[in-house]
Amino acid sequence: MTRPLNLVWRRKALDSLMEATFIREVLFAGVRRPIRWIALEDGDDLPMLDDILIVSFGDPADYLKALRDRGLHNIGLFHLGDERGENSIEAYALADYVLRHYHFPERLRAGKAGGGAEVLWVPNG
């Protein structure tokens, strides 16, 4: 059996994000493995899993570092928001790959230039 991709969200974000249906029905429609949607309440412990894609509006660096410190594999970041391209992207270096919602060429190059993750633009919704 193929291991699932663990897609981790904060429930408040998942419930309020208009693009959630687009992400589920279009963006990940062609993924050839099970996708486990994990919705966390504020204050819940963050899951420590391999094959994880963290959906984030903020800076997930501490979470990504904790995953790395445990030796976990296939760690992705789906960076939503950042409409002005002003958020820190230091966490990108802690991920194996990054999906980014808003297109800023310098943000897409940032991961590779720093030896970090590949950053892919996802025209979302």
Image (spheres, grey):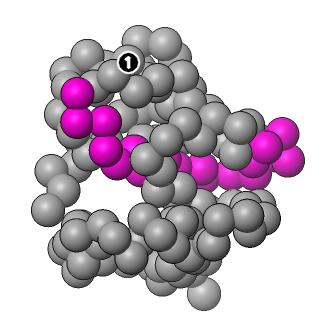
Q: Is residue 73 magenta?
A: yes
Residue 8 location (% of width, % of height): 55, 66
When asked about the image quadrant of residue 106, the answer is top left
Q: Is residue 2 magenta?
A: no
Residue 107 location (% of width, % of height): 31, 23
- In the figure, is residue 87 to the left or right of 103? right
Residue drawn 57% across and 76% down? 38
Callout 1 amino acid: Ala
Residue drawn 54% across and 22% down? 90
Compare residues 25 and 3 and report the one nearer the observer: 25
User: Does the rendering let one see residue 111?
Assistant: yes
Residue 23 location (% of width, % of height): 27, 69
Residue where numbered disc 1 is placed: 110
What segment carries the magenta color?
Answer: 66-84
Residue 102 location (% of width, % of height): 21, 39
Q: Quadrant where the N terminus lies?
A: bottom right
